[in-house]
Image (cartoon, helix red, strand yellow):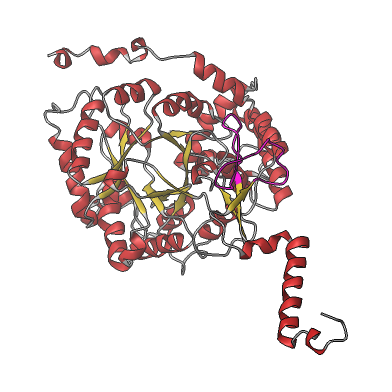
Amino acid sequence: RPPNSQSSTMPATHQVKRRRLLGLSALCLYCPMTNCFLPSPSPVKRQNRNSRLPQARDDANQIVLPPNSTPELSVEESNFWRSVPKRQRPREEDVIPCQSNLDADGPLPFGAYRTYGNPAFGPKQTCLLSVALDFTPNVEQQRIKQRNRPGKRRRNGNSLKKTAVDRLVEGVSVNAAVRNIQQLIGAGCTSFQVAEDPTAAAISGNLPLQEWADENVFCKLRKDTPPSVLRGCNFMTKIAVPSKDSAPFGKGSSIREAVGASLRRSGADSIDTVQMQYCPDSPYHLDVLNVLFEMQEDGFVRSICSAGLPPTLLTDAEACNFHIDSNQVSCNLLDPEEYFECVQACSDIGSKLFCASPLAGGLLTDKYLQCERLPDLSLLSAAELRHIQRTLSIWAKRNGVGGGLGSVWSSFHSSLLQTIGDVAFKHQVSVASVALRWSFHLDSLGSVVTGVRCGIDDEDDRPFSRPRELRKLFTFELDEEDMQRLWDATGCDPEALNSRNGEEGGTEDDLPPDIYASKKLWL
């Protein structure tokens, strides 16, 4: 129409619509993300920006990788509203937990709890730091009580009635022990076992402290603790293997009675973990495992593990379809060889290793950091004396240190203990924390077992501070330089230990010859 015609004027509503369409067209032209307003058949997946792998587009308008390329661990799913990265969550078994700003109580960081065992039987989680409850008083407390006792040399009727267990736990408060365990649970340490002397248990064939703890401590703990808290705890019960000179094994009635008695004493419905103690001169290990696995199928046992089993016996048990969830061996900075002897066998059968005696009975603590001379042996505990006579001698032989026990102690203090002290000063932690943190880096590790003395009354002695000390383990980490210094101080090369372990293999000739000496066993 002519320009000056009145009908050529466009209505206002049409002009507004025209401006909106032009503006939306401009946005679509310069801002491609506005295309997300339109319905699409599927969201667009794009790789990370740093990835330069060739890409191809399929019929569904989706970016995919070629079939021969390696997929990325992180794939982003994007739309107009958000971009969500899809990452593979790491397993707790592959993570060494560390959190610098850890609270004073509550659960431990991610990676501190692992689950071992057959899921069909409902195994409980195991904490990376297990607690071995020690109910025996220390040497100083025993001396003070004997000094203050008026008639300590008089043998009256009451003293004659005391058993060996009563003398071991004399002066231990059950109420204080229960309070200490509850504080440990509140600090995140949920795996417990009773600290027994392995040598005495192998000789006597019984576990007196385990029986006393089931009847007195654990029974009261179950009454005074809510069931919701106990469901997250893992209590280990130790079972002794009959020796060759004991009564005939038969159908394993003695093992069934031991498990049933433990359930009656503690008041539990089932045992969380049963740990079979190794007896060097016994041929009944596989028979005991057979009985324990039968009781596991009946619902009385959740998990089965062992303590001190050699690699050959672990392999034989797996060949008989007896899968042991974990095996506990001694390992510390003084003597890590026993641990590495079982690493290959446990990795082959899919079992884990528990690291016992990580502090060498208390030698790797701040107590002896300033003690340059050999301490008085009469003032040491049984565990400290045992590690000084055995473990310290193994370390001296490996590092070529000669002379008497005094010179060995001086070399140990100047080389190994001072190195641990330097690393501890670097991270502002204790010597025990560095020794325990070093154990977290071991291969095939299931848990680190450290001893905690319970039953100390707060009114007579200092407050129970072990939970706070144990939580400090998860607030720092050792770098490669620290680990190399610690390994150099031990005198061992971890790569050499692993290679030697792979080359050496056990045979039937490694079994002790006295097993076949008795004619009763052949019959």
- Main SS of the magenta part reads loop
In magenta, the rendered stretch is: 47-74
Total marks placed: 0
Task: Give the position of the N terminus as an image quadrant.
Answer: bottom right
Where is residue 37? Give x, y as percent. 62, 65
Where is residue 187? Give x, y as percent. 49, 61
Out of 250 and 230, give the one closest to the viewer.
230
Horizontal arrangement in the rendering, residue 164 relative to residue 380 (left or right): left
Asked if 103 appears above or below 501 in the picture, the reply is below
Question: Which residue is located at x 53 percent, y 61 percent?
Answer: 465
Task: Give the position of the C terminus as an image quadrant.
Answer: top left
Asked if one can make out residue 367 in the rendered structure from this viewpoint, the answer is no
Out of 339 and 459, give the one closest to the viewer.
339
- Residue, far bottom: 6
Where residue 347 sits, quadrant-wise, is top left
Q: Is residue 54 magenta?
A: yes
Question: Which residue is located at x 12 percent, y 36 percent?
Answer: 253
Asked if 267 appears above or below 450 in the picture, the reply is below
Where is residue 356? Give x, y as percent. 46, 38
Out of 482 and 181, give the one closest to the viewer.
482
Where residue 199 sits, quadrant-wise, is top left
Horizontal arrangement in the rendering, residue 67 relative to residue 286 (left or right): right
